[in-house]
Image: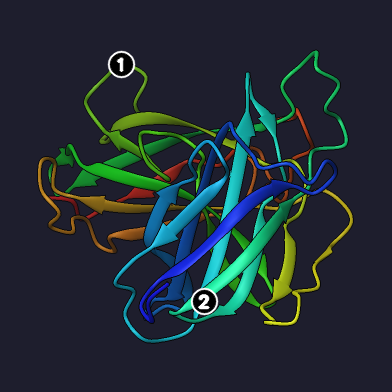
Amino acid sequence: MDSSTIAGTLIDATTHKPLSGIAVAAIEQKDKAGIDRVVMSAMANSSGQFAFHSVPPGSYDLVANASIGAGTQYSVNITTGVQPGTQVGNLPLLPSPSDAGVAPSAAHIFGEVDTAGAAGGTNATVTVNSLQQVGGVLMTIPLPQPSGVSVSVTTSAGGSCPAGSNCGNYTLLVPGQNPNVGMFSSSGTAYSQMTGNPTYVIDGQASVPGSSTPDCNPPDVQVSSMDGGGPLTVAPGGIATASAMRFSGCQ
């Protein structure tokens, strides 16, 4: 392995077998606001293996997520302090305690995005991510889906939109348990998992439809509460509706 590659294998922490379903790994670094953003992402192959090539020098947080079959969800694995030229070995993902082979164990978070300009509703494309507070840092939780690690919503006019706004809806399937976290060590990384149900922050980044040009003011909005109040906390198999994500000053 060359000095600009980060590679490893995603495994089931219980069976120690490679994850052969839909599994994704991402390397992340903090942006100007201190939020861990995805720099590169890759789907694991049928043997659970992934690799990032031509990684710029620096320290990265390696975040892995997996979903098997009809929504059977694993906890996220987060390995901090990973540098290029590292073979991280096996990354253990913990299966949800509610997995019984009967019902999906991923939690569903539903939400609405509203976009408005100076003269009323305006279309915008919003990239929606789920974030979690880990060690004082908001980290992006990549979604294990072939279409990408985030969800894209393009707003439009409609009768259900709030007055003066265009709107769109999103659905995120996220782990209903907290991440398994450890700082990388070449002699063997030790992981630990916080008890209790996870609390999420939903992040939206607006752009002009059909381009990567940022839109709205500000172009980045986060919501951290349920529709109706209270923190956005979910359990395995649970359903939650986030408070509306409202953008203004859009083109």
50 and 142: which is toward the camera: 50
Q: Is residue 208 visible?
A: yes
In the image, what residue occupies the spot 63% across and 49% down? 225
132 and 122: which is toward the camera: 132
Figure colour scheme: rainbow
- In the picture shown, does residue 242 fall above or below 71? below
Drawn side of residue 152 relative to residue 190, left or right: left
Say what secondary structure mark 1 lies in: loop
Q: Which residue is mark 1?
A: 159
Say what secondary structure mark 2 lies in: strand
Q: Residue furthest bottom?
A: 58
Type of residue at label 2? Thr
Q: Quadrant of the N terminus?
A: bottom left
Q: Residue furthest front?
A: 1
- In the picture shown, does residue 193 fall above or below 239? below
Type of residue at label 1? Gly
- In the picture shown, does residue 229 fall above or below 132? above
Drawn side of residue 211 relative to residue 233, left or right: left
Percent x, y of residue 117: 17, 47
Label 1 Cα crowd, 10 Å radius (few <14 / some 14-19 / many 20+): few
Q: Which residue is mark 2?
A: 86
